[in-house]
Image (cartoon, rainbow, N blue to C red):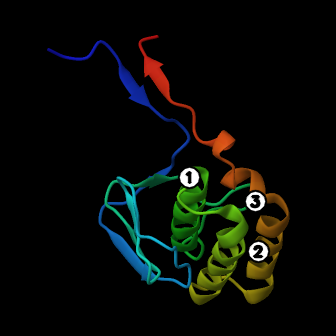
Amino acid sequence: MSDPFIQYKAGYKYQLVSDYQISTKIKPANDVLTDYILLDTKGNLTVKKGYAWDGTSGPVIDTDENLRASLVHDAFYQLMRMRKLKSAEHKEASDKLFRNMCKIDGVPSPVAQLYYFALEKMGKPSTDPANAKTIYKAPQ
């Protein structure tokens, strides 16, 4: 027997086709495990195959030079929205990691610094659990 409806979230542009791992300075008190994101107490982040994200935000255009950073940043902000990480403790480090990854991947330093400034000033609402993606059902 099948379910009479599906549940889904909208607004994603990209989806990982393989796991992505990176060592970070963001170290939670306890391991964080979700369906698609794993973060251990040593700062090792794994974003799992199938994870969907929306790329960079605002007027910033997605490029090869900022897409990897947007993946990692979106995963950290999602953990904050899920209350798995505290925004007050980890937002700044997440924003700085985004800036640094952009520079490593070829974004000019002044541009990466502008990205960071925008995140610092306007990113807080994206860490708020009230702004998690809406779950829709079809058919209604």
Measured as percent of width and height from the top left, residue 107 is found at 66, 82
Amino acid carrying label 1: it is Asp
Nearest to the eye among marks 1 and 3: give it.
Answer: 3
Amino acid carrying label 2: it is Tyr
Q: Earlier in the sequence, mark 1 or mark 3?
A: 1
Residue at 72% over, 86% down: 108
Residue at mark 3: 123
Measured as percent of width and height from the top left, residue 45 is found at 43, 74
- Decide: few, some or many residues near mark 3? Use Cα within 10 Å; few <14, some 14-19, many ≥20: some
Tell me the CA gap for discs 2 and 1.
Answer: 18 Å
Measured as percent of width and height from the top left, residue 105 is found at 56, 84
Residue at mark 1: 54
Residue at 76% over, 59% down: 123
Looking at this view, is 4 or 101 the one in front? 4
Tell me the CA gap for discs 1 and 3.
Answer: 15 Å
Q: Is 122 above or below relative to 128? A: below
Residue at mark 2: 116
Q: Is 93 displayed left or right of 15 in the figure?
A: right
- Decide: few, some or many residues near mark 1? Use Cα within 10 Å; few <14, some 14-19, many ≥20: some
